[in-house]
């Protein structure tokens, strides 16, 4: 058997060049494969960071949902309390006038605070009924409104950063007795 030194001395320069070229190609292929794995791992890490940031932001944004639902109840009760006061009159005692004005100011301030924190009340009166935002409490015949129109809102729809907290309780229009249903749209 020959030693490595004897094999190297006996190999021709062309054979050495071919062996070196083959080794270089092998190493370049290995480098390309490792580079591809590295790029994929970096992309996966970037996606993971983006997904985690999105989840943390969403958790932060909606973490107060239960608290917001309870606060909305207090806002509704304040609104009901104001609505239960008698209508303003010229001869009413000054204390009633001041009470009404004070409670109205408190309500405006309270609603402004809620809105600053992403909690909004939306009055749907006049809009079309949307089962995702409204809860139909009654139907009322109407000749002046198309069926499905919200005639009256007993309560507003409350949202937290666009997510529904409490649906609006509404009265919707239905076709008047004896009225013909609207024609079907056959253009579609």
Image (spheres, rainbow, N blue to C red):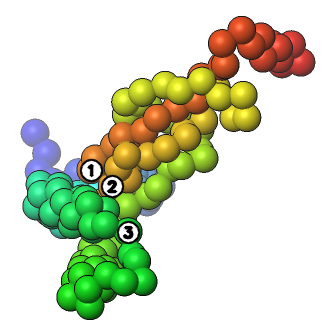
In the drawing, does residue 96 fall left or right of residue 13? left
Asked if residue 8 can be seen in this view, the reply is no
Compare residues 70 and 146 and report the one nearer the observer.
146
Looking at the image, residue 185 lies above or below residue 136? above
Q: Which mark is residue 165?
A: 1
**Count of numbered tags:** 3
Q: Give the residue number, with chain letter if any, for mark 2.
A: 158
What is the residue that sits farthest to the front in this orientation?
A: 91
Q: Which residue is pictured at 77% across the width and 10% down the height? A: 180
Q: Are the two marked residues, 2 and 1, in contact with CB atoms closer than 8 angstroms?
A: yes
From mark 2 to mark 1, how far is it between C-alphas?
A: 5 Å
- Of labels 2 and 1, earlier in sequence is 2
- x then y, percent, for residue 187: 89, 18
Q: Which mark is residue 87?
A: 3
- Of labels 2 and 3, earlier in sequence is 3
Assign a secondary structure to mark 3: loop
Assign a secondary structure to mark 1: strand
Q: Which residue is pictured at 49% across the width and 25% down the height? A: 139
Which is in the foreground here, disc 2 or disc 3?
A: 3
């Amino acid at each position: 058997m020959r030693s490595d030194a004897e094999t190297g001395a006996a190999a021709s320069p062309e054979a050495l060049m071919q062996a070196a070229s083959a080794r270089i190609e092998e190493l370049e292929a290995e480098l390309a494969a490792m580079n591809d794995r590295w790029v994929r791992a970096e992309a996966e890490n970037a996606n993971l960071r983006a997904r985690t940031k999105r989840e943390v932001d969403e958790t932060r944004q909606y973490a107060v949902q239960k608290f917001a639902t309870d606060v909305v109840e207090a806002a509704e009760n304040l609104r009901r309390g104001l609505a239960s006061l008698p209508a303003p009159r010229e001869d009413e005692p000054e204390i009633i006038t001041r009470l009404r004005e004070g409670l109205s100011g408190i309500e405006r301030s309270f609603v402004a605070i809620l809105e600053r924190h992403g909690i909004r009340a939306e009055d749907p009166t006049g809009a079309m009924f949307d089962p995702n935002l409204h809860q139909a409490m009654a139907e009322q015949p109407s000749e002046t409104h198309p069926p499905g129109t919200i005639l009256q809102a007993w309560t507003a729809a409350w949202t937290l950063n666009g997510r529904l907290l409490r649906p609006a309780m509404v009265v919707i229009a239905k076709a008047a007795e004896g009225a013909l249903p609207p024609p079907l749209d056959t253009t579609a």
